[in-house]
Each structure stands twice: as structure tokens, then as C-alpha cells.
Image (spheres, rainbow, N blue to C red):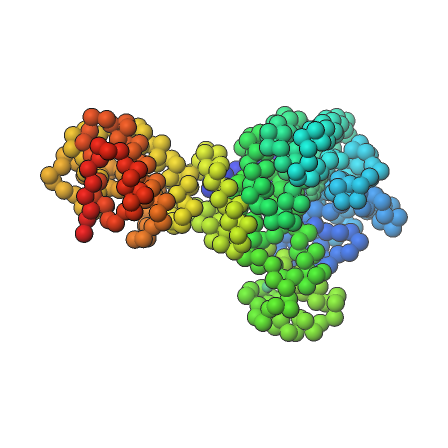
Amino acid sequence: MGEIFEVRSFDAAGRIGELTVPRAGLTVETPALLPVVNPHIGTIDPADLASEFGVEMLITNSYILNRSDDLRDRVLSEGVHTLLDFPGVIMTDSGSFQLAEYGDIEVTTEEILQFQRDIGSDIGTPVDIPTPPDVSRAQANEELQTTQERLKTAERVGQKMDSEMLITAPVQGSTQLDLREQAARHAYQTKLDVYPVGGVVPLLNAYRYADMVDVVAAAKRGLGVDAPVHLFGAGHPMMLALAVALGCDVFDSAAYAIYARDDRYLTVRGTEHLDDLAYFPCSCSICTNHTPDEIRRCDDETREELLARHNLHVTFAELRRVKQAIRRGNLLELVDARARGHPKLLDGYRTLFDHSEQLERSDPVSKDAVFHVSSECVRRPEVMRHHSRLERLSVDGDVLLSEGGVNEAFDETWRVVPPFGPFPRSLSETYPLTVEVPERMSRKSYEMAADGIRALVETNPDTSFTLAHREWPKSALTRLPNAVAVTELS
Ligand code: GUN
Ligand code: ZN
């Protein structure tokens, strides 16, 4: 494929991009969230999705359309855009998810791709096998072989059918991380266009965000930066920032409708049950025009629709917040804030920093943003980058590393800022050392700063160093090399 995806700006591994969809003649800004539209039970009219929510792209299921006696002929004759009354980009899934949920489905990749082409889908999907988490290596491997054969089939069908429809190349491999990476590398080498990370719905439903992070990070290692990445089945607003920070570009949300059916109200800090709400913590049109009591008194259908509308509003608001954060360079601050909403999300956030080196590769060297420091931030890409820089900084003579001012008795006075560690004053105006840090930091921040001093000492064994600190904890001071003299500032 030609250049269908261009990245405009990065923050960590997150990016603002443009996905060009030739068959629709449209370019969609990413990260994009595709509402899932069930052709049988539309809670919200797709025409409203465009006008009220600004939706540019949605996803529907070609398998359901194909199997439906009422809809098959209609969608074949009038096309899926007319059937759904939606002017934007329509992506179609293949029935793989039904395969995972209900067992056997009776359709081949060739048939369903041709059907997707025939109904006018803009982005089609082959019948991949959504292997669930935690299966044996043998099963993961065997099912991945099948998925890979289907991608090859999709590639062949795609070339033969001479259509501008884009085709996805789902990445499977269960929770076997090396298989995920290998699957991604294989998918990337096909002539297919969009790369969904699949089989993660059970992880998301169980709030296993740490595993989700490892799985996505593994897939990302096998894909080039120019690969648009879809996270299949992810649409809860509380995890969007985290998934975007990992480098996912496209999401689909069935959550807005499924949760509404059970009276569940989405927020960026988790899910609330309508019965537990005395107030609406949201300023969307639904929440400003109704009280929780009023919605509780509505009939089932109205209540479901109102909740679905709120759920979608809150999801798109979060998506805009995520995009704004990328532009502003403070996406990781947003992820940090979201991680406080749920312990499992905090685990996911901590796991994100197990991949700090991977994030560092795309993270901008300079940002016009303030760096907020929480205990997790000691492993942010910016801190890692400063630490590797310390191994290259050389300095001679008698050097004071100080949290206070310059002392003329020394040849040089460097600054020390936890969690970064030491740096020459000339770097003070360079990101991220422009950081504003709280006066009281976590113990881990001081320990990281001490490790930074150790790295500097190891690079400059003939230089004499003195640290002038303010109330560093013992656990940090004991990490310093013996050769460093220590004084405490008052
Ligand atoms: N929807 C949610 N997960 C998946 C998946 O793994 N594959 C496909 N095709 N659709 C999905
Ligand atoms: Zn609302």
C-alpha cells in the first residue's frame, strides 16, 4: 500500500496521525474512536453519530449483515452507507468475534471479504482467530498459523478484487509475547493496510491492563512507525490515554451501548451504576439537562438511549483530551491522572514504564510542557534519557553537585534535581530539566538521582565530587559511591 498513514506529532509512543481511506475519499484524524453499530439494534442513529458527536468513522459487522435475511439483499443493493445512513468511513468486521464468543461460524475469508467489498465497506477484515489470553503455547501457535494463512488469503483476494477497500491484518498470539511480536512482523510484511491487535477483549473485560500493555508493546515492536494500529474492542474512556500512549491509533467502542443496557454510566475514572449516582459528574447535554433521578424514572428504552448518549459523549470528550495532551506534550501526565482511578489501571501504567526504552524512541526530545512528578515518573522516558546522557558527560577538578546555589570554593557547581540527578547549569534551560518539582519527592526519586550521580562518577573516575543535598533519605545516600563527599544543606 502507498502512504495511507502519516504521523503528525508524537508524545511517548502516542501520536496524532492522519489515516487516508481511499474508497471513502476521506482522511480521518487519529487517534480515532469508532462506535460499533449493530445493524439490528441501533441505540443511536448513525446519522446522529456524525451530526451530534462528530463521528467520522464507525465499525459494523459484515457477518451479521450477511447472515440476516432482512438485511443481506438490501445492503447489497443500496450499500452499507445508505443502509446505515452514515456519510463517513465505514469499517467492517468479519465475524471473527462471533467465532470467539459462540464457536463455529460458517464463512471463509474469501467470501466475507468479497461481501464487504460488495456492500461498499471502506475497510474490510479477514476471518482471523481471536485466540484468548493464557492458552497453551501450542494453541496460540497453531491458531496464529491459521490467522496468518488467512492474512495471505486476504492479500491475494485484495489484489484480485481490484477495489480501493483497505484490508486489516489482525495481530494475534494470545499472551505469548514473542508470538505477538512475530505475528506483528508477519502482518506488517503483508500488503494489508491496518493492524488491529486482536484477542484482547477478555483482558479488557477483566481489567488486566498490565497484560494489555505487554501485549500491545510486543505487537508494536513488530510493526513499523508508519503502521496504523487498532486496538480491537477497546472503548472504555478510562483506558484510552494509556492505550494511546502505547501507540494505538484506532479504537472501537461497543462499551457505550453495552454498558447503557445495564444502566452503567461511563466516566474517565471507571464505571458507575446509575443507581449509585446522586449527581452527574459530567457536563454533556444529557447530564446537564437531566438529573440521575429523572433518568431512573424513564422507561427502559429512553433510559438506555440517554445513558448511551452520555457514554459516547464522555468517551469522545476523553479522546479530544488525549489528542490535546499529545499536542501539548503532556500525555503521560494524563495517563498518570487516569491511573489513579483504578488500581488495575495503575498496574497498567507501571507496566507502561517497563517499556520506557521503547517509548523513548518516539518521545520528543523537547516539549513545551511542565513535567509533573509522581512516584511512577522516575521511569519516564525523559528520566531514562537523562540518565544515559550522564554516562557521556565529562567534568574535571573539584565539582559540587548541589540542590542549593553556586559555591565558588569549587571549580564547578552542578545542579541536582531528583529524579534526574546531576547536570551542568548550562543545561538548566533544556527540557526536561526545566521541570518544576515538588519540594517533597518520593524516596524512589532521590534514589534515582543518586543512581545518576553514580553514573557520572563512573564516567569521571578522576574527578572529585561533593553532594550538597536537602534531606535526602538514607536509602538514597547509601547508593552513592564512597568517593562522593556528602554535606546537608540547611
Ligand atoms: N473484535 C474484538 N476482538 C477481535 C479480534 O480479535 N478479531 C476481530 N476480527 N474482531 C474483534
Ligand atoms: Zn454526560
Tell which of 255 and 167 is nearer to you. Answer: 255
Looking at the picture, how far across and down is residue 363, in whole percent?
A: 44, 38
Task: Identify the residue shown where x is 62% and y is 27%.
Answer: 182
Q: Quadrant of residue 399?
A: top left
Looking at the picture, how far across and down is residue 162, in whole percent?
A: 75, 30
Residue 443 visible in this rendered orientation of the protein: yes
Tell which of 211 and 484 is nearer to you. Answer: 484
Most extreme residue toward the left, as rendered? 409
Q: Is residue 355 left or right of residue 3?
A: left
Residue 77 visible in this rendered orientation of the protein: no
Q: Assign ligand 2 to one image quadrant.
A: bottom right
Q: Quadrant of residue 398?
A: top left
Q: Is residue 351 left or right of residue 386?
A: right
Q: Is residue 362 left or right of residue 454?
A: right
Tell which of 110 and 350 is nearer to you. Answer: 350
Q: Is residue 97 above or below residue 154?
A: below
Looking at the picture, how far across and down is residue 312, in whole percent?
A: 63, 57
Task: Identify the residue shown where x is 46% and y is 50%.
Answer: 336
**Total numbered labels:** 0
- Which part of the image, by quadrant, shows the N terminus? top right
Task: Identify the residue shown where x is 39% and y is 36%.
Answer: 384
Q: Is residue 466 above or below residue 160?
A: below
Tell which of 440 and 270 is nearer to you. Answer: 440
Q: Is residue 433 above or below residue 285?
A: above
Task: Identify the residue shown where x is 33% and y is 42%.
Answer: 447
Q: Quadrant of residue 137?
A: top right
Looking at the picture, how far across and down is residue 150, in whole percent?
A: 74, 29
